[in-house]
């Protein structure tokens, strides 16, 4: 069965600093991988997704993620964080029936 | 185009009471999902539907029932609420083609006393 691990529960970065959120997955076949963001009191919004091809994926709001099969990782990055990026971030892997399995989430705090 | 809407936004129940959460989408999506979100556990799939008149169990289906009588609506029912069902519930929908984006509703915060 597929699973997703997000090792960091909380991360705090300074505004303008770079960001990397970690995600490790377990899946037998070629994975379909996603990053979602949830602002406080809101639903989830898709940042980016990887299906195949180029292992560096560009998303919305200046985010990118890199798929590394050898490390079973799909880490999310942003070169310069803005205060509005403070939110909870979820990594997910797609399985049978178009079902998603989510990680536990990483809460990002941005300090000014 | 409202996307995915959920009714109600908040609800407080007493143990043993019943209620129904309504999810509606106006994107003509085939697939719909109900998740619950608990701190430190991410989102877990309760039930899902791959088309009108169909439903299937997800990861944590116990204590919940669902119905998809109309394509645009997906109902989640709690027949006898328990404190363990205190959570935030999210509905999502997608076309069902490949791994098209799942679009999420704003959530329903349910407290069971």
Image (cartoon, rainbow, N blue to C red):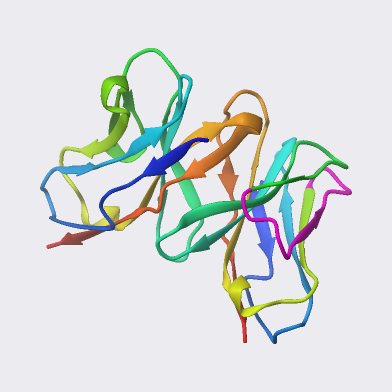
On-image quarter of the C terminus of chain A: bottom left
* Residue A14, image quadrant: bottom left
Q: Residue at x 22, y 57 (%)?
A: A83
Q: Principal SS element in the magenta part?
A: loop
Q: Residue at x 85, y 40 (%)?
A: B52
In-front residue for pair A66/A5: A5
x%, y% of residue B31? Answer: 71, 38
Q: Which residues are magenta?
A: B59-72
Residue B90 lies left or right of residue B40; in this view the side is right
Residue B53 lies left or right of residue B46; in this view the side is right
x%, y% of residue A87? Answer: 33, 57
Residue A45: say if magenta. Answer: no
Question: Does the image show residue B47?
Answer: yes
x%, y% of residue A3? Answer: 45, 40
Residue B60: say if magenta. Answer: yes
| Vertical position of residue A82 compared to residue B38: above or below | above
| Vertical position of residue B2 compared to residue A76: above or below | below
């Amino acid at each position: 069965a597929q699973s997703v691990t997000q090792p960091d529960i909380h991360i705090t970065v300074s505004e303008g600093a770079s960001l990397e959120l970690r995600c490790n997955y377990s899946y037998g076949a070629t994975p379909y991988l996603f990053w979602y963001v949830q602002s406080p009191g809101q639903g989830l919004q898709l940042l980016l997704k990887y299906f195949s091809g180029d292992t560096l994926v560009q998303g919305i709001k200046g985010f990118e993620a890199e798929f590394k099969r050898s490390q079973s990782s799909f880490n999310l990055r942003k070169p310069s964080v803005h205060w509005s990026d403070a939110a909870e971030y979820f990594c997910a892997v797609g399985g049978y029936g178009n079902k998603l399995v989510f990680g536990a989430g990483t809460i990002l705090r941005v300090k000014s | 185009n409202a996307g995915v809407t959920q009714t109600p936004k908040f609800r407080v129940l007493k143990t043993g009471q019943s209620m129904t959460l309504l999810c509606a989408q106006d994107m003509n999506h085939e697939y719909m999902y109900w998740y619950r979100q608990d701190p430190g556990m991410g989102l877990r799939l309760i039930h899902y539907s791959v088309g009108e008149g169909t439903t299937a169990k997800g990861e944590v289906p116990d204590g919940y029932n669902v119905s998809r009588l109309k394509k645009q609506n997906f109902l989640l029912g709690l027949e006898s609420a328990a404190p363990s069902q205190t959570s935030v519930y999210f509905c999502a929908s997608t076309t069902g083609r490949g791994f098209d984006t799942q679009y999420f509703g704003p959530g329903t915060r349910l407290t069971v006393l």
